[in-house]
Amino acid sequence: MIKKARALKKEDMEKIREIHNEFNPNLELPDFMTGFYCGFVIEDDSGEMVVAGGLRPSAEIILVSDLDRNKVTLTKALLEARNASLYVGKRFGLDEIVAFVRDNDRFVVQLLRQGFHIRSQALAIKVPK
């Protein structure tokens, strides 16, 4: 059985590091104690950690683009949109901005040239109102 979530404690980080190093050694371990709204741990009935994680602020850049414009103009506009987003993200203390691109390889190429990197596949869930 699984217990409900509890708040992450500093002393949990050793076990989290252990689990992370065993199953995700090529990924950077986030500091769940800093920059997160909250960190949490899910334990089984015997008190063993099953899952640890946290909810951190995130930003998604959403663009509506006139694809009839020429490539140079569109590329310059994307660069300016990136710059504006980085400026605002820095002001709000964010460490990452995400762009989800659907059905437009040209945008993917341009964003990669402008400093974006491919992250893992993202899944989303709506927060109930």
Image: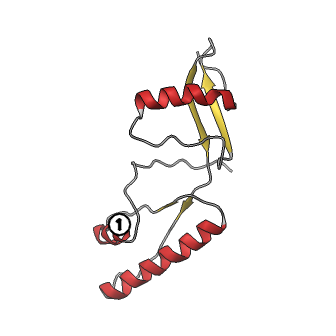
Q: Residue at x 61, y 67 (%)?
A: 90
The spot of residue 95 in percent (x, y) is: 56, 58
Judge left or right: residue 88 versus residue 123.
right
Q: Residue at x 42, y 41 (%)?
A: 27
Q: Nearer the viewer, residue 13 or 66?
A: 13
Q: Secondary structure at mark 1?
A: helix
- Quarter holding residue 102: bottom left
The spot of residue 7 in percent (x, y) is: 70, 32
90 in relation to 129, above or below: below
Q: Nearer the viewer, residue 119 or 106?
A: 119
Q: Which residue is mark 1?
A: 112
Can the viewer see residue 56 in this picture?
Answer: yes
The spot of residue 20 in percent (x, y) is: 47, 31
Type of the residue with mark 1: Leu
Q: Residue furthest top?
A: 46
Callout count: 1
The spot of residue 51 in percent (x, y) is: 55, 28
- Circle 1: is it few (<14), some (14-19), or many (20+) Cα within 10 Å? few
- Quarter holding residue 106: bottom left
Can the viewer see residue 69 in this picture?
Answer: no
78 in relation to 37, above or below: below
